[in-house]
Each structure stands twice: as structure tokens, then as C-alpha cells.
Amino acid sequence: MARILVIDDDRAYLDSMTAWLAMKGHEARGMTAPPPAASVAGSWDLVLLDIMLGEEDGFGPLAAYAAAGVPVAMVSGAADAANAVRAVRAGAVDVLEKPADPDRLEVTIALAEEKAARARADRAGREAWLADRLYVGGPGPFADLVLAAERAAATSLAVLLHGPSGSGKDPLARWVHFRSPRCAGPYVAINCAAIPAELAESELFGHRKGSFTGASRDRPGCFMEASGGTLFLDEVGEIPLPLQAKLLRAIETGEFRPVGADATVRSDVRVVSATNRDLRAAVAAGSFREDLLYRIGQVPLAVPPLSARAGDIPGLAAFIVRSLAGRSGVPEPVLDNDALAWLGARSYPGNVRELKSLLERAVAMAGAGRIDAALLRDLDAGGWAPGVAGGGFSFDRAMPLREAKRRMELLYLERQVALAGGSIARAAAALDLLPNNLSRRLGELRQGTSPD
């Protein structure tokens, strides 16, 4: 049995169609006007949407429903090839003529049920991803923040996450996406601080082949790649001032011109941004546009440093150890009470990222299956384990060589970023790398997806 919503301004057709669907054993409801996408997503397996709704057409609602992952079949009273092509390109799973052929409609319903089942499985996978990476903890500032982020996710407003480096802005941005009506769409993240200024426009808006040296093919850019979903602009305060006007227009209108293109293109994205800078001070200094700040900061959310959620540290540490062990395929070590007490008493200038880095080394070194305060103190000395070759790795503990290389490279690169004050750009310069290459490499190593 499928849950089917029929939207048509012809009341007689609406009644006959819902009655026929109910006779076939489906749960059907008719409406003469399209409801908001947020109320449809997750509630219906298929929407039968009339192409013409009085003086309006159904393409606006189709775009909203498709972005929310709702299967939509457009219904038309007359054959129109142009409208059919437009509907399919806009995300419709099928285009039907009135009166709908019963056999064709049953096939469409079956396809919609299959798509809905895949969407539920994808949603479960996303929830598992979040459960593995976002620790909320007990009542406190971070739990309040996650609740506020969930409320913001249900809207279409732009969200700005402001907080110190390493405080957990990226998992929160993903939380906003996964909890939003756009959760079935793409999530595209870009670190604005890691893009060379001369390539920033191409990274955001794409380019046409031959538009500059090295442009050997068309490239869509992040705005187009995120169409129908969420674009996360990490370190948005680092976007060059000359590009900010184009970014503002793209966010406000959905229109932009790829580098070297003759015409504008459109993309439907929801923007979530993050920064560790004081953007109001940047506005006063003339390095950030005030109108852009208002546009990206419709819902400003302050992400607290780890020092403001000290009560979460024992639970957060256990959560991180369990997550790291699970992803590495090693037995979960036991965190001794003295280790938890030591962790709770320590300060974390690098916030959650610093705590996670320390615990990743501890998990690698916990050969006896326990993490105690003595081990943590040794690992914490200068950020590296003294007297242990390989930066906190014991050569007496066997693991796959690829995993050992991944951990050692990750520890080294994260240490260089820490020594550079958390700046990807400064660390990349010291390592003789491009900032975007360093950022991408860190992401690969943290996710365990390194191709090497």
C-alpha cells in the first residue's frame, strides 16, 4: 500500500482519483492547493500533481518537492512534449495524461514506493553517520544549540555557525542538512580558506572549457553540484572581497555566471556557513560586506568552545573512543576512571578537534585494551609520545600497513595545522602544498578514504 497525495484544482477529478486509489488499497488524500514541502516530505510516497493549477502551474511545487526528496508524477490534461521534458528535468518521476491509464499508474506507484524505500534507507544511513560523529551530551549549551539547529533546519533560512576552530561546526552543518526537507539532496562542503584567491570564483560557480589556462573541460562548481541540497561554506569570512558581491547575488537569486560563460545559470541551494572570525569586526574593517553578512546570517548560531561544555567531556571522550575504534576495526579500549578525570581537568585550546586527536593516538597505543591517565599524559607531552617512534605508534602492535600509514600521516598533518595556529593556509605554505590540496588530504585521512 502506498501513501499518495493528489493535488488538482478539478474537484470532480480529485474525488474520482482518490476513490480509485483507495479501491486499489492505497492511502489517498486529495488537495486543491499544494501544501509546503516540509509537510509533504516523509508523509507521502507519491504526489500526483496537476501541471496546471488554476492560473498557476505546478512547476514551482514540483521543484520544492523534488528538492525535499518527494517522488512526484505530473498529470496533464493534454499531451505536451515540452512540458513533459521540463517536468522530468525538474525532477518528476513520470508524466501522465488524464485520464491516467491504470496499468501505467500502477507502474508509477511501484517506482515511487521503491524510491521512497531507498530514501528511508538513505535517511537511516545519514542518521547513523550523525550518531557516529555528533555527541550532544546532557542538558547544556551544546544540547540547546543542536535543538536550535534542528528548528532552523525545518526552514529555508540561511544558517551561520560561529565558533572557535575545532568546536564542531562541520557536524552541525551536516545536522542542519540531514534534518531539513533537502536531506535527500546533495551536501557539498567547501573550505573557503583553502582556496587560492585566483581560483575561488571557479570553485564556487564553475567555469567553461578554455576560459583560463588549465581549464581543459567544463566544471560545474559547488553551487551547481549542491543544487537541490545544501552548500556548506566553511570559513566564509575568507572569501575575497571582490567575489562577495557575486556570492550575494547567487544566494539571493539562485543565478550566477560560470567563469567564461555567456549566460547565467540557475541553482537551487540552501546555504549554511561557518566562521571562527568576528564578521561584524570584518564589516567595520571593510573586508566583509554587510549585506552579505545579513544574508548568510539569517539564523546565527553560536557554537560554544569545549571549555563551555566541560561536563560533556567524559561522555564525549567515551563517544569518540567508541567511534574511532569502530571505524578502525579494532576492539574498543576501556577508558579508566583516572583517564576520564585527567581528560576533564585538561584544557583544550583546539576544542573537540584537539580532544579527538589525542584520543586517536590513545586508541592506537592502547595495546592492553585500556587507556589510563599515564598513557594520556605521555601522549600529551608536546603533542607527540616521547621516546616512541612513529608519533604515538607502537611498533609492537600489529595493524594493516595502510592503516598505520594513514594514522601517521594524519597525526603529522594535524600537528602542522596546530603549529600554524589552526590556519590551513599557513600550514600548507610550510608544507609546500596548495591549501585546497591539504584540506582535501586531511578530509580523506579523517574519513579513512585515502586512495593511497
Image (cartoon, grey):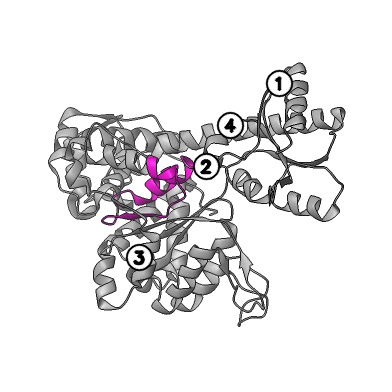
Nearer the observer, disc 3 or disc 4? 3
Amino acid under disc 4: Ala
The stretch drawn in magenta includes residue 67 = no
Magenta stretch: give its range. 151-179
The residue labelled by disc 2 is 181
Pointer 4 or 2: first along the chain: 4
Pointer 3 or 4: first along the chain: 4
Give me the disc on residue 293: 3
Measure the C-alpha gap from mark 3 to mark 1. 48 Å
The residue labelled by disc 1 is 26
The residue labelled by disc 4 is 121
Contact, CB < 8 Å: mark 2 with mark 1? no
Q: Secondary structure at mark 4?
A: helix
Amino acid under disc 2: Pro
Measure the C-alpha gap from mark 2 to mark 3. 24 Å
Contact, CB < 8 Å: mark 4 with mark 2? no
Q: Is residue 41 above or below residue 445?
A: above
Measure the C-alpha gap from mark 4 to mark 2. 16 Å
Contact, CB < 8 Å: mark 3 with mark 4? no
Neighbours of disc 1 within 10 Å: few (<14), some (14-19), many (20+): some
